[in-house]
Amino acid sequence: EKFTWEQKHDELVKAIFNTRASKRLSVMMEDVRDRKEHLTQWCRPELKKALYHYWATDEKYLHRQATNKRNRASERCVIYTGGSATPMQTKAKMVNYYN
């Protein structure tokens, strides 16, 4: 209602909005995971309870969380790889890519 742009820019505006909204939602969910009650009043209590249960019991989530934690803490990895690949897996992919 408050903003207008030429129709040819619709896709770009949509992409920018989706990127920013995605980043903001990630921060908001991190606040919920960290139990920052003063920042998570937007989330219904029953939904928070369900999320806490999921994060504490889902085996796939817990495995991915542990893998990412190990990767971030690895001394062999100079920079965070951004996912669940070990530093050795990332190195192998890079060697294969450049050869």
Image (cartoon, rainbow, N blue to C red):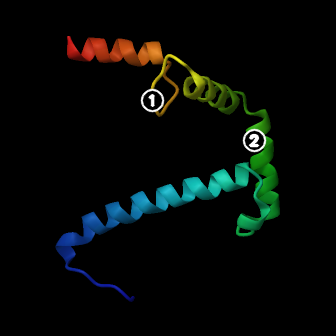
Q: Nearer the viewer, mark 1 or mark 2?
A: 1
Q: Residue placed at 73% from the left, 50% from the top?
A: 34
**Is the residue marked by circle 1 packed among few (<14), some (14-19), or many (20+) residues within 10 Å?**
few
Label 2 secondary element: helix
Work out whether residue 76 or residue 82 is closer to the camera in this orientation and state it.
Answer: 76
**Is the residue marked by circle 2 packed among few (<14), some (14-19), or many (20+) residues within 10 Å?**
few
Q: Is residue 62 above or below residue 35?
A: above
Q: Is residue 55 above or below residue 4?
A: above
Work out whether residue 71 or residue 58 is closer to the camera in this orientation and state it.
Answer: 71
Q: In the image, residue 48 lies at what x, y percent?
A: 77, 55
Q: In the image, residue 45 lies at what x, y percent?
A: 82, 62
Q: Residue placed at 33% from the left, 60% from the top?
A: 15
Q: How many marks?
A: 2
Q: Residue placed at 82% from the left, 59% from the top?
A: 46
Distance Cα–Cα, label 1 vs label 2:
29 Å
**Mark 1 touches mark 2? (CB < 8 Å):** no
User: Would residue 75 appear left or right of 34 to someone viewing this image?
Assistant: left
Which amino acid type is marked by label 2? Tyr
Reading the image, the residue beneath label 1 is 79
The quadrant of the image that shows the C terminus is top left
User: Would residue 27 appear left or right of 85 to someone viewing this image?
Assistant: right
User: Would residue 8 appear left or right of 57 to someone viewing this image?
Assistant: left
Reading the image, the residue beneath label 2 is 54
Q: Is residue 22 above or below residue 71?
A: below
Q: In the image, residue 13 lies at what x, y percent?
A: 30, 68
Which amino acid type is marked by label 1? Ile
Q: In the image, residue 8 lies at what x, y percent?
A: 17, 72
Q: Residue placed at 82% from the left, 52% from the top?
A: 49
Sooner in the amino-acid sequence: mark 1 or mark 2: 2
